[in-house]
Each structure stands twice: as structure tokens, then as C-alpha cells.
Image (cartoon, rainbow, N blue to C red):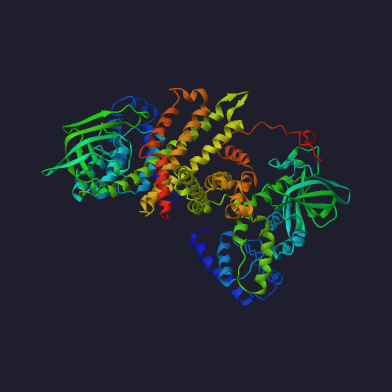
Amino acid sequence: MHFSFTEEQSQFRDAIRRFLRDKAPISEARRLMETGSGCDPEVWREACEDLGLAGIHIPERYGGLGAGYVELCIALEEMGRSLFCAPFFSSSVLAASAILNSASEKYKQELLPEIASGRCIATLAVVEEHGSWDDPDIRLTARKDRDNYRLDGTKNYVTDGALADTVIVVGRSPAADNAEGLSLYLVLGDSTGLTRRPLNVVDPTRKQAELQFSNVQATLIGTLGSGSTSLSHTIDQAAVALANEMVGGCQILLDSAVEYAKLRMQFGRVIGSFQAVKHKCADMLVDLEHAKSAAYYAAAAVAENDPDLAAVAALAKATVSDAYMRIAADCIQIHGGIGFTWDNDTHLWFKRAKSSEVLLGSPSHYRERYMQFVEAGL
Amino acid sequence: MSAADHGADEVKVRRAVAEWLEAHWDPECGLIEWRNKLIDSGWGVPHWPQAWFGRDLPSGLTTAIDEEFDRIGAVGVARIGIRMLAAATLLEHGSDAQKSQFLRRILTGEDTWCQLFSEPGSGSDLAGATTRADFDGEKWIVNGQKVWTTSAHHADWALLLARTDWDAPKHQGLSYFVIDMTQAGIDVQPLRQMNGHASFNQVFFTDASIPAEHLIAKVGDGWKIAMTTLAHERRGADALRRWGRASDRPGRIYDEERAEIATVMEPYKWYAQRAGRVDLVLPRARETGRINDPVARQEIAKLLMLSQVSQWTAQRARTAQEQGKPQGPEGSLGKLASSHVARAASNVHTLIAGADAMLCDNDGPLDGIIAEILLSVPATSIAGGTDEIQRNIIAERVLGLPKEPRMDTGPFRDVPRNPTR
């Protein structure tokens, strides 16, 4: 079923929503966004121990909950709603999916239980200075050095890059100039030669860092040269996850705009009675409903190994990013002057919307990608 | 009823209808004669009440019954056009005398109906109708004008919403009638649209008359009954899509049905263009080479994504309803979404056509189809409730935002309104 949730899934959603309401109210996001780590280790530990949060879609044999991608996306929607400050997207979505898709059995057994328990925070480093998620643009080199590899180059926009204990790095064999040369390497966060610079980010509830590698020791975790296909699959899955996270933000912003429009009085009546305002709210609902349709369909497509996943993911990422930005801008507009103040919470989601719009690739990038699938006879 | 009970019923019902059809179906029978047989058997409208040609079956079973008809190739009762809106309204609010006079001939297809609601002065504000019906002690006398009336030029009967009390508040001064369209006091004129077609009519009443027994329910009930008719309008559109295509099988009855469908469907021949013809975008982009233009590619992708997502949103709404959630605002949401798709499609067709977008008919792309799209799409956001009305419905009924303060309470006589001819 692409468009409905089971009773168990709804209960799972309720449990996460309750946890986040109690442990991660928006005041906590405001506190944590001013810190360097952007995460409360105690709340993260509780989330992992009580809810198994870090291992939702990691199979039970690797210490996870063994639930599906739809459940993962339900959790993400709730986190997007509350702006939960935690390394979930970096560790459980990006790094865990990359390992599941690419690593050999040995490294799955070694890494996944640690990630699933939340004890190890991992992330995935793909993009470089140019900000492109396409593999031909990946230049970081991985040179063979006896049993190991040595990495040289720079990775940028690495989510939770300064916090992560473990970084999965996409690197290229020096001789190979094509996609076949890409592989995944494991690097410890405190390795010699690795310089991590936290970036000043528009959305301080999701930290990013620049990672400079200078002769850094690394371990190959999959088959040499097999990185490209599995990487694009990982990014497709992550785009679907991000789309579902964005839906949570869309919903709370619409709710907040409507609530404010029912309270705010001007010209002797609540502003929600003016068609100029209520029509904007109606358009926001249409955007939200479309965003949900795209995100939920795409989540099911991942869960069911839909052969058209890449096209569906492109559609979901482009559609939901655009909807989120429109809803966030309109939510500020409906709040008027107060919506532009620091004290009003709207800007926190506006910033998440802006950052998510380009994370993993912009809407126009995904529209072009979608066209390529359409032309190939989707 | 559980799914299992339903399943058992479905098997029984399928067997019963198939047995009856196998015993009685004859493609060489006349269309009207066959339909009369069908109506007497109760299999023509099995979800209708037993007292009125039906079998009181749950409407969930009609799909299975229709499948048996399709399997055997049997023709069903007449069910496209305004007739089913008339039938639904009469079933719910009509007297027994009205039901026995009208229902059978609606189902046989002998009578064609139209709906006289919109007026030049009342479009979105339907309850502002000023066509008047005055009782002269014996019959009702009608004067005024209606507009946007599909099929009025060949209708036998019409559903009429008219004002009977000018001192009551707007919604309470309306009454609902069945009126004979073939009388002298009614003049029907085609209304030509900006796309050149004339699919609708203007209807002028000059002392047209209605016998007292053709008032539906009571004087002043008009608005309430009109709401019943409008609630069925969505289903009417579904029926057009489902039953608007004729069978190409040989046989006398199919010939008669083909002629009937051709007449009813004639006004709708540009409706596909009105929705934007998203299906033509890729072939046109390839044929013109615009598929290689990065700007066009972005716009095409936006359109294709929006069109796909709109379909998913409609499916998601249906899924929720099937699971027993109450029918929500999906109709209005879907209507608004279709407007967005149509408008985006029109823009993309223009982008692809370039200078050719200035040409129409046999000089225009696709023998004028592209021009017809560009000139028909503006109807999408107006017909069947404007986008603005849909937004009001969504904002007020779903989001719970308050209504605008009203300027039209009090006696209708004193409400500001458009000048009439």
C-alpha cells in the first residue's frame, strides 16, 4: 500500500511523537543550535535505548529493529516536525544506508550494531568544494598503502562531520578517472591528518563540517571500484528520507500559520477571515497534500525495491523541497512582522527548508535527472 | 458488513445477474424495449430502492454487476448527462407521482434532462438566483434567464431553481421545480465560448408555465434540494468518463446506443483539451526538438511531476475513504490541483510551440489541437466552482478559518445585486 499506514505504523508514529514532545521541544532545538555538537547525548542515548531509534531500518541480525523504510520515514517526518537536534540523518540514514548498500559482510557486522545502538555516530562524506552530488565530480584520492589506503583531498557539507566518530568517505582510485574508480572507505573521526572545520550554516539545527584529508589512513569497506552504483542508490534512498523529514516541517508550519490566522485581529476581525489570507492557507494545504503523496509513495517505493526508485526519488525530492520553501515563506508572510523576528519559531523551520532544498542536490538538479528517466521511457 | 460477507454476496449477485442476462440479452432487441425489460428486472439500477426499479443492493456491488454486463456485452440503462442528477434528486425529494412520471423514461433514455441553475447575475453565488416563479392560483409562471445550460437545446425536461419569495432571506426564498422544456415560453440560444465551440446554452423564460404538481417538495425548499443535486454532480462527471465511450460491437442495439452517446457527448469534445493534454507534452517536445532545451526540460519536468503527484493525491484520498474515513475536502483539493495542472500544461505547450502558438486550426500545431488547449484551459478554473470558491471551501471546512462577514442577510429584495435585463 503506497498511501496508508497500518495500525502498528500509526502506534510507532505516536510513540516517537510523544518522545519528541517530552524530550525535544522547540526550546531544546533553540538551546542545542547554539552548541558546537548540536545534539544532547543524553536524549540521543534515551532515544536509542527506549525507541531503538538509531537502528529502525537496520536488520535485526546487525542489532537493529529490522523495520522497513516506511517506518524510517515515519520517524523522519516526526523529527522534521519537531526539528529534533540529533545525528539521525547522518548516522542512521546516510552512513547506515551506505554500509547496507556497499559494505562487505565483515564490515556490516562490525559497524552496523554500533550505529544501531547509537553508541557510534557515523556520517557519509560525498560532496567536495563544487557542491555536486554527481560522481564524476568526486576527486578525493584513495591510494593503496600495504593493507590499507591513504586519503588525500577535501570533503565539504558533511552533515555532523565534526561530531562523527566514524566517517564513510567516497574516494577515487588515483588511476581511475571514471565512475568505476569510486569506493567507500572507513575513516575514524580522530585520525591523524584529518582536519575538521565546523561550517557556519544557515540552519544551525543541522551541523555541517569541511573535512580535509592529508595522508589519512583509511579502510576499504566494500569491493574496490563498486562505489558508484551503490552510491547513487544510497543518495536516492536518502533523498526519499529527506523528503519525508521535510513533510513534517510542512505540516507544522501550515498548522502554525492557520492557528495564527485564527487569533490575529486586524481591522476588527481575525485575519483568517480575509480571503487574501485564507486562500494562501488553502494553497499551502494543497502543497502539503501533494508533498505527502510524493513522500509516502517514494518511501513505499524504497521499501518495495521499486525498479523506478531513482525517478520516484527525484520526483519526491524536487516536489517536496519546493513545497516546503513555499509553505515556509507563506508561513512567515501570514505571521507578518512577528514572523520575521528571532523570537518567533517560524524561522527555525524556514532555515531547515532552505538547507534541505539544496542538500543532496537542488530541485532543478532532480528535475533534470527525472527528465532523463522520462526520456529513457519511464 | 465485513469484507468476507461482502465477498460472499458478490459471488451470489454476480451469479444472479449473469443468469438473468444470459436468459434475456439480445443484441438485436430495440434499445428502449431492452431497457424497459432491464428496469422491470431490477438489474438496471440494482442500488436503487426496490419500490423504484432497484434491488436495494449496496452501491459497493455495482462494479461487480457492471463487470458482468461488460463480460456478456449487455447494454445498461441510460446514465450519462444530467439525467442521473435528475433521478437522484427525484428519488430523494420527489413525490411518488413525480417518481412514476419521470424515473422510467430517464432510465430508458427516452427523456433528456438539463439543469437550470446558473444565471448571468449569479454564478458562484448560486443562491442569488433572480429567475422568478409566481403562482397564479393554478400554475406557476416563470420569467427570467438561465445560462451555462448543457443540453438545453434538446432537453425534454429540466430541473429549475427559481425565486418564489422576495421577502425571505436569500437561501429561503427559492423553490425547486421540474419544467417542460418543449413549451412556447422557453427560448434556448447557444452560447458561444472563447474557444469557438458552443457547448452550452442560454435559456430565456417569458411567462413559461409549470403545473402545481411539478413543484418538488415544498415552497422554499429549493436551496436544500439544489444541494442534493450538486452533491451528485461529481458522480455525474465520473459517469461521463465511464459510460461516455460507445461499444464498437455489431448489432441493432449497439447502433442505437452509439447514436445516443454521440449526441450526449457532443458538447464535451473539447474537454480533454480543457484539462491541458499533459499526454501530448513529451511527443510534442520530441517532435519540435525542444526536449533538448534545458529551460524547457525544467518546465516539462515540473508539469509531469505535478500531474503525477495530483493523481497520487486523488488516490490517497480514495484510499482514506475506502478505509472508512469520512469524505473530506478531496473534491475541492482535486479540483484546485486540476486547475494547476491545466494551467502549467498550457504554459508548457506554449513554450514548446514557440511562434506556432499564435496559429490555430489547420495552420496551428496538431491541426489546431494546441490552440484549442491554450483557449480552453481558462475554463478549468471556473467551471464547476471557481478556484476561489474551492479555496474558500478548503479554508473554511478543512482548516476551520472563519467566513467573510456577509452582506446578503435580510430580505432578498434589499440585497445588492447585479442589474437584470
Q: Is residue A8 visible?
A: no
Tell me residue B358's x, y (percent): 60, 46
In this rendering, is residue B334 above or below A153?
Answer: below
A162 relative to B416 in the view: left or right: left
B223 relative to B278 in the view: left or right: right
Q: Please name whichever residue, A84 or B124, is drawn nearer the observer in this view of the structure.
A: B124
In this rendering, is residue B131 above or below B411?
Answer: below
Q: Is residue A110 visible?
A: yes
In this rendering, is residue B29 above or below B320?
Answer: below
B140 relative to A114 in the view: left or right: right
In this rendering, is residue A4 above or below B403?
Answer: below
Q: Residue furthest left?
A: A146
Location of residue A28 by image quarter? top left
A152 relative to B74 in the view: left or right: left
Which residue shows up at 58% across the image and 24% down it? A265
* Number of marks: 0
Tell me residue A42's x, y (percent): 28, 31
Tell me residue A41's x, y (percent): 27, 31
Q: Please name whichever residue, B290 or A269, is drawn nearer the observer in this view of the structure.
A: B290
Q: The C terminus of chain A is located in which quarter? A: bottom left
Tell me residue A368's x, y (percent): 41, 45
